[in-house]
């Protein structure tokens, strides 16, 4: 296994960025799954555009470096091309909830068997700190010097409303918990969404250092009403409510592969479209 899924690319994230920790959590999760029987060559990843996307250069698995907001459809395309692959999608809060919001909503309806991890620092950090859909109200930045006037989006509530079958939230600084949740998301049959709350060391510093506001859930909610109530505890404004971590919701339902006989056939044969005899 090549350097235990590490590459030789120099890491260019800012010193102290939680992306370093997210990378390590993902690496540990994949290594553990490989020990359990997953094949390294069957892992594939996509990324969007943003600070998060550099993980593509540091995690040694195959994949496609995508466009801004197009992480999810690219990952779906890989899964449709070969339903035997274990597909991971890494994206940012601006990447997913601005340009990519339509893809996010419909991903729950299709229930493609793949995992989406959203690095959420509540800002467009790569382009120097503009407000993202999850930025707090009154956040002042170069694009909005008077402060952001719109309320922040709550992605957990949106995910629940969009019928996503696995919904979770993690703290980027907690390697062990993030690794555990990621492993459960990958092994879940269906579309899995993990929001990873992280600080940015350069922009929107007001929302940093929220560990004391966070607590871990013991188990997924039994009803959607319970999950929505938990999702309402944190509204993404500064110091407004506690921040639940863990799995909010998990359910079993048919995946896109199971709905399409063509994909089910490829899955049974253990091949992709390119291997199908004409």
Image (cartoon, grey):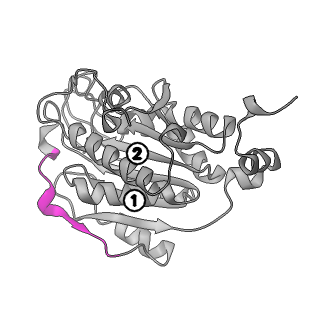
Answer with mark 2 or mark 1, whichever residue precedes in sequence: 2
Whether residue 235 can be seen here: no
The magenta stretch is: 207-218
Q: Quadrant of residue 203?
A: top left
Q: Which residue is mark 1?
A: 168
Q: Which residue is mark 2?
A: 117
User: Count of labels shown?
Assistant: 2
Specify the quadrant that holds the C terminus.
Answer: top right
Which secondary structure lies at badge 1? strand
Specify the quadrant that holds the N terminus.
Answer: top left
Q: Position of residue 258 (x, y in %)?
A: 73, 55
Q: Nearer the viewer, residue 189 or 125?
A: 189
Residue at point 66%, 38% (across, down): 82
Residue lying furthest bottom: 222
Which secondary structure lies at badge 2? strand
Category of crowding for the residue at label 2, using alpha-carbon neighbours closer than 10 angstroms: few (below 14), some (14–19), many (at least 20): many
Magenta stretch contains residue 66: no
Classify residue 44 as left or right of residue 58.
right
Q: Position of residue 40 (x, y in %)?
A: 47, 41
Residue at point 23%, 45% (across, down): 198
Q: Quadrant of residue 211?
A: bottom left
Report how far apart the C-alphas of labels 2 and 1 lie in the structure: 10 Å
Category of crowding for the residue at label 1, using alpha-carbon neighbours closer than 10 angstroms: few (below 14), some (14–19), many (at least 20): many
């Amino acid at each position: 296994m090549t350097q235990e899924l590490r590459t030789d690319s120099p890491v260019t994230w800012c010193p102290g960025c939680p992306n370093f920790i997210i990378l390590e959590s993902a690496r540990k999760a994949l290594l553990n799954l490989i020990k359990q029987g997953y094949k390294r060559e069957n892992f594939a990843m996509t990324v969007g555009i943003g600070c998060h996307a550099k993980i593509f250069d540091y995690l040694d698995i195959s994949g496609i470096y995508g466009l801004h907001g197009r992480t999810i459809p690219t990952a779906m395309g890989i899964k449709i091309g070969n339903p035997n692959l274990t597909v991971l999608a890494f994206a940012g809060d601006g990447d997913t909830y601005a340009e990519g919001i339509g893809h996010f909503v419909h991903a729950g309806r299709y229930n493609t068997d793949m995992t989406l991890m959203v690095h959420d620092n509540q800002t467009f950090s790569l382009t120097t700190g503009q407000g993202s859909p999850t930025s707090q109200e009154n956040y002042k930045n170069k694009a909005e010097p008077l402060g952001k006037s719109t309320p922040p989006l709550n992605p957990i509530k949106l995910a629940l409303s969009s019928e996503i079958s696995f919904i979770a939230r993690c703290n980027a600084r907690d390697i062990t918990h993030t690794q555990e949740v990621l492993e459960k998301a990958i092994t879940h049959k269906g579309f899995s969404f993990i929001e990873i709350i992280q600080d940015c060391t350069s922009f929107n510093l007001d929302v940093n250092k929220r560990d004391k506001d966070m607590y871990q859930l013991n188990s997924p909610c039994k009803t959607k009403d319970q999950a929505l109530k938990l999702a309402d505890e944190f509204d993404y404004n500064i110091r407004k409510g506690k921040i639940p971590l863990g799995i909010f919701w998990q359910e079993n339902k048919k995946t896109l592969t199971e709905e399409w006989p063509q994909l089910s056939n490829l899955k049974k044969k253990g091949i992709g479209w390119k291997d199908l005899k004409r």
